[in-house]
């Protein structure tokens, strides 16, 4: 497909230049990550959902806001909701700051209400105000692996499960992050933090 192997990592990193755009593919076992230097995608998402002229907000999610499957609000078109969440999930590959709210709202793909739809549009409004934000990677003399973990407690109103989150940096910049619902129902904030820490340690290993 016209990609060239990286001189520093011939087996997993491939690069292609198209006009002024750089496309990078990183392979890992049976998975791959695609990125590049084209900054137009977020703007195209805003344009797709007619949000290019919306008023921006400072946070992607209102503080302490909780969602449930049966919230009593009016149902919305699932196709439109899935389309927004799908576009936002693609963006999480380069924007860790929206990982949690997008992961949270993706739980309601088959039962989306007006409250969920409004929250998804809030993330778009946040993106509008952070179009110039990005991850910066710099050359450093010393490389240190730093990992951070966190969790809520019984954040899901439907099944009382908590959410684990982590991110890692190596020298500079965040390169790995996640926000996922825990597989078990825990009985305290301490236990929720322990489950999140265990997930983070497994990822570091």
Image (cartoon, helix red, strand yellow):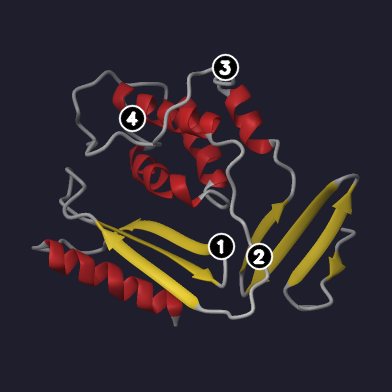
- Residue 205 to residue 180: above or below: below
**Nearer-N-terminus badge (3/1):** 3
The residue positioned 38% from the left and 26% from the top of the image is 117
Q: Which mark is residue 173?
A: 1
Image quarter of residue 53: top right
Discs 4/1, front: 1
- The residue indicated by pointer 2 is 138
Tell me whether the residue at label 4 lies in contact with that at label 2, contact meaning CB atoms closer than 8 angstroms: no
- Of the numbered discs 3 and 2, the one sitting upstream in the chain is 3
Residue pictured at 36% horizontal, 39% vertical = 105
Gap in Å between the C-alphas at discs 4 and 2?
A: 38 Å
State the SS at label 3.
loop
Tell me the crowding category of disc 4: few under 14, some 14 to 19, or many 20 or more residues within 10 angstroms, Cα based.
many
Q: Nearer the viewer, mark 3 or mark 1?
A: 1
Kindly report the distance in space between the C-alpha atoms of the residues bearing marks 4 and 3: 21 Å
Q: CA distance from mark 3 to mark 1?
A: 30 Å
Residue 24 at x, y percent in the picture: 75, 59
Tell me the SS state at disc 1: loop
Is disc 2 placed on a helix, strand or loop? Answer: loop
Spatial CA span between label 4 and label 1: 31 Å
Residue 177 location, x and y as percent?
46, 61
Residue 159 image offset from top left, x and y in percent? 17, 49
Quadrant location of the C terminus? bottom left
| Earlier sequence position, callout 2 versus callout 1 | 2
Tag 2–tag 1 contact (CB < 8 Å)? yes
Task: State the residue position of label 4.
Answer: 116
Left or right of 98, for residue 37: right
The residue drawn where x is 24% and y is 70% is: 195
Pointers 4 and 1 in contact (C-beta within 8 Å): no
Frontmost of labels 4 and 3 is 3
| Separation of residues labelled 2 and 1 (CA atoms) | 8 Å
Instruction: Kindly identify which residue carries mark 3.
Output: 53
């Amino acid at each position: 497909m016209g990609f060239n192997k990286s001189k520093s990592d011939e087996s997993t990193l491939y690069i292609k230049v198209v006009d002024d755009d750089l496309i990078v593919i990183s392979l890992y076992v049976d998975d791959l990550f695609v990125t590049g230097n084209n900054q137009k995608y977020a703007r195209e998402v805003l344009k797709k959902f007619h949000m290019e002229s919306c008023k921006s907000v400072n946070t992607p999610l209102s503080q302490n806001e909780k969602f449930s499957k049966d919230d009593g609000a009016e149902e919305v078109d699932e196709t439109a909701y899935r389309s927004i969440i799908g576009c936002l999930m693609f963006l999480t590959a380069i924007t860790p700051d929206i990982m949690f709210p997008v992961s949270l709202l993706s739980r309601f793909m088959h039962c989306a209400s007006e409250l969920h739809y409004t929250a998804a549009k809030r993330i778009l409004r946040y993106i509008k105000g952070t179009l110039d934000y990005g991850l910066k990677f710099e050359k450093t003399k010393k490389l240190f692996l730093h990992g951070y973990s966190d969790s809520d407690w019984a954040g899901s109103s439907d099944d009382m499960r908590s959410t684990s989150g982590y991110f890692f940096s190596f020298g500079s910049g965040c390169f790995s992050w996640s926000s996922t619902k825990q597989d078990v129902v825990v009985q305290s904030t301490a236990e929720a933090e322990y489950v999140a820490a265990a997930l983070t340690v497994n990822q570091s290993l």
